[in-house]
């Protein structure tokens, strides 16, 4: 996106916000232009009823989350009584217009009894010649004597605004609607019953020589002998057919494998290979595998894990249309493949832990905390489950929750280090949010913690320039909404401020909602982007101050200079635009290089609550 910086300031009295009519959307090859009220694919007009078009716009402007039925009805049919089938009818019409199928749901997703959402990536572009406006803190026109400074401000800030306008991503549904559909904690420690903690009613019982032993945190089940297993007679809550799913489990071998052994399996007990049976197993060579028995319908990892140590397995199948399968061990992806034989899992029959449904050899080891999800967890969520379960303390009692695009790499915290260092291994946005461990680490708890409104944040930042001369940015954000693993912090219901250190030594203060650059400093002459620099900030009340390499930062705020930046919570409205839940963390970007550079690093992070 490009533009003339002279258009940014405009004339006194023009709007200080980016109008929704000044953008156009691209969704699955279809262009939606609200300014012209048009929906086209390759220049061909797609006809939609007025209310169906309004539903589409309502979803486009809320791409990062589930949109409840109540919210849709209130937004599109305010103060109007409508029948229960009006929303399904609109969604069906949209599916037809986009060539989407209810069984595949690659564009529009239905969350049963909850609402709807977009699951295809949304791109946001500037429409025509509509101006992009920087929102000043002081709502007054620049003085004539500051004209050159103001134009420079527009030139500096426009690439950042352009970058922010692209920050609308495909994101998983909010964590509140993602839960374990089966969860055998295996922590009872006595008796023969293994309870299902998910509430789905799929408890089982220990059979044969299966016994309770000490586990990862409390109890677990050891499988010894030929007939040891935990079995249940109903798998109805588990994913069926070719639906997406994730299976996680902790395991530890106690002897070298002498056969391929099952960790978890459900479906029929027929002897012939069938796409109706689905399972996770350890192979004779210590590698992990999962899928069906059909050729082209399974995946095997690369590592050998029969080492008598605890490990966390995550087996992920994405479902249609990608049919990708991924295998993770200890929070890291080992392998990914596209299946050609599609599972047709039968969930009306039995399930078993530690031994196959066909009665083959039992797993030679201990299994703990086995969970099933009816969605494909991404790398961020898998990593969050692992870090929570292993009680990582990356900063005090907090652990790092990876957010934004994949690319965040968390390194081990060394002796004497106040925090775990981390880096951006990709070239797009990445980052983390501080999270607090909750008992048992249910998936719904994998969210950022409330660390306070008034904070002092300090860290050493490396913001390199790549071999092509492309710059990067990094810095802390605070007063944000509580994100789930892999979620975004810009757009949707965002709130808060983000302090960005650029490769030139310039520092920008970004308000996340309504999005705007509210202050920035001058570049630092001779700034060395190949070394770490200490960036510190204090956000207290409605004022932010910062230091770079122990020196106070002088900001340009509107048409004035000073060390204090006003940071009012304009997202509170009216109308209410964002949710401030006291979440904080560090994020990486390369706005001015159009997300083409990375390599940022952070160490010695310190976060202190001031109130």
Image (tube, grey):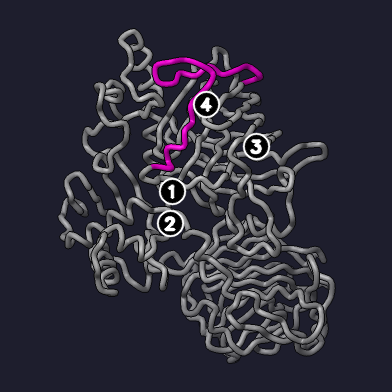
In the rendered image, which residue does mark 2 sit on?
Answer: 65
Which tag, 1 or 2, sits closer to the chain's start?
2
Residue 28, by quadrant, is bottom left
- Residue shown at the point (80%, 69%) measured from the top left: 218
Around disc 1, counting alpha carbons within 10 Å, would you say few (fewer than 14), some (14 to 19), or many (20 or more)? many
Does dot 1 land on a helix, a strand or a loop? loop
Q: CA distance from mark 3 to mark 4?
A: 29 Å
- Residue shown at the point (47%, 42%) measured from the top left: 495
**Tags 1 and 3 touching, CB below 8 Å:** no
Q: CA distance from mark 4 to mark 1?
A: 26 Å
**Tags 1 and 2 touching, CB below 8 Å:** yes
In the displayed structure, 567 sits above or below 349; it is above
Q: Which residue is at the front of the view, 140 or 241?
A: 140
In the rendered image, which residue does mark 3 sit on?
Answer: 611
- Residue shown at the point (35%, 63%) measured from the top left: 108
Q: CA distance from mark 1 to mark 3?
A: 25 Å
Which tag, 2 or 4, sits closer to the chain's start?
2
Does dot 4 land on a helix, a strand or a loop? strand
Q: Which residue is at the front of the view, 22 or 519?
A: 519
In the rendered image, which residue does mark 4 sit on?
Answer: 502
Which tag, 3 or 4, sits closer to the chain's start?
4
Does dot 2 land on a helix, a strand or a loop? loop
Q: Which residues are magenta?
A: 548-573
Judged by depth in the image, the label closer to the viewer, 3 or 4, is 3
Residue 362, by quadrant, is bottom right
Which tag, 1 or 3, sits closer to the chain's start?
1
Residue 541 percent location from the top left of the image: 55, 32
- Residue shown at the point (45%, 43%) measured from the top left: 490
Tell me the number on the disc at residue 493: 1
- Left/right placement of residue 70 relative to residue 533 reads left
- Left/right placement of residue 241 relative to residue 215 reads left
Decide whether residue 560 is among the magenta residues. Answer: yes
């Amino acid at each position: 996106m490009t533009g003339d910086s002279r258009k940014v300031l405009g004339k006194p009295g023009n709007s200080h916000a980016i109008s929704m009519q000044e953008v156009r959307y691209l969704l699955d090859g279809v262009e939606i232009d609200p300014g012209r009220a048009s929906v086209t694919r390759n220049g061909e007009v797609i006809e939609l009823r007025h209310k169906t078009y309004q539903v589409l716009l309502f979803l486009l402007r809320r791409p990062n989350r589930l949109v409840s039925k109540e919210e849709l009805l209130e937004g599109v049919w305010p103060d109007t009584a409508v029948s229960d089938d009006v929303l399904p009818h609109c969604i069906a019409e949209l599916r037809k217009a986009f060539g989407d199928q209810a069984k595949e749901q690659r564009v529009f997703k239905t969350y049963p009894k909850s609402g709807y959402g977009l699951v295809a990536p949304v791109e946001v572009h500037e429409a025509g010649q509509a101006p992009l406006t920087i929102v000043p803190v002081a709502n007054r026109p620049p003085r004539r004597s500051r004209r050159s400074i103001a134009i420079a401000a527009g030139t500096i800030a426009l690439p950042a605004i352009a970058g922010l306008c692209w920050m609308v991503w495909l994101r998983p549904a909010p964590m509140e609607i993602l839960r374990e559909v089966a969860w055998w904690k295996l922590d009872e420690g006595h008796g023969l019953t293994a309870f299902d903690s998910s509430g789905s009613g799929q408890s089982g019982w220990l059979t044969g020589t299966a016994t309770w032993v000490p586990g990862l945190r409390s109890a677990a089940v050891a499988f010894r002998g030929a007939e040891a297993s935990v079995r249940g007679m109903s798998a109805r809550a588990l994913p069926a057919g070719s639906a997406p799913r994730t299976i996680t489990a902790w395991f530890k071998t106690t002897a070298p494998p002498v056969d391929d052994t099952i960790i978890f399996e459900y479906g029929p007990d027929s002897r012939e290979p069938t796409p109706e049976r689905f399972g996770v197993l350890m192979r004779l060579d210590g590698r992990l595998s999962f899928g069906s028995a059909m050729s082209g319908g399974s995946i095997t990892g690369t590592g050998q894990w029969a080492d008598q140590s605890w490990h966390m397995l995550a087996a992920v199948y994405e479902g249609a249309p990608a049919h990708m399968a991924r295998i993770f061990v200890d929070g890291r992806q080992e392998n990914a493949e596209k299946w050609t034989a599609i599972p047709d899992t039968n969930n009306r029959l039995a399930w078993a832990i530690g031994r196959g449904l066909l009665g083959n050899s039992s797993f030679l080891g201990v299994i703990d905390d086995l969970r099933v999800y009816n969605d494909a967890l991404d790398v961020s969520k898998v990593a969050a489950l692992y870090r929570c379960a292993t009680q990582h303390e990356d900063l005090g009692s907090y652990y790092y929750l990876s957010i934004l695009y994949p690319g965040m790499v968390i390194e081990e915290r060394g002796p004497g280090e106040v925090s775990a260092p981390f880096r951006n291994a990709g070239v797009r946005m990445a980052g983390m949010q501080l999270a607090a461990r909750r008992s048992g680490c249910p998936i719904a708890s994998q969210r950022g913690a409330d660390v306070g409104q008034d904070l002092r944040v300090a860290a050493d930042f490396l913001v390199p320039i790549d071999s092509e001369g492309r710059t990067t940015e990094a810095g802390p954000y605070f007063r944000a909404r509580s994100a789930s693993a892999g979620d975004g912090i810009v757009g949707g219901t965002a709130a808060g401020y983000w302090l960005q250190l650029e490769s030139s030594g310039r520092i920008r203060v970004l308000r996340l909602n309504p999005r705007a650059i509210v202050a920035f400093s001058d570049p630092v002459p001779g700034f060395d982007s190949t070394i770490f620099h200490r960036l510190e900030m204090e956000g207290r009340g409605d004022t932010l101050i910062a230091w770079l390499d122990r020196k106070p930062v002088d900001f340009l705020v509107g048409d004035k200079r000073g060390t204090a930046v006003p940071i009012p919570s304009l997202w509170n409205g009216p109308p209410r635009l964002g949710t401030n839940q006291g979440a904080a963390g560090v994020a990486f970007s390369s706005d001015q290089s159009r997300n083409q550079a990375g390599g940022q690093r952070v160490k010695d992070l310190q976060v202190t609550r001031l109130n």
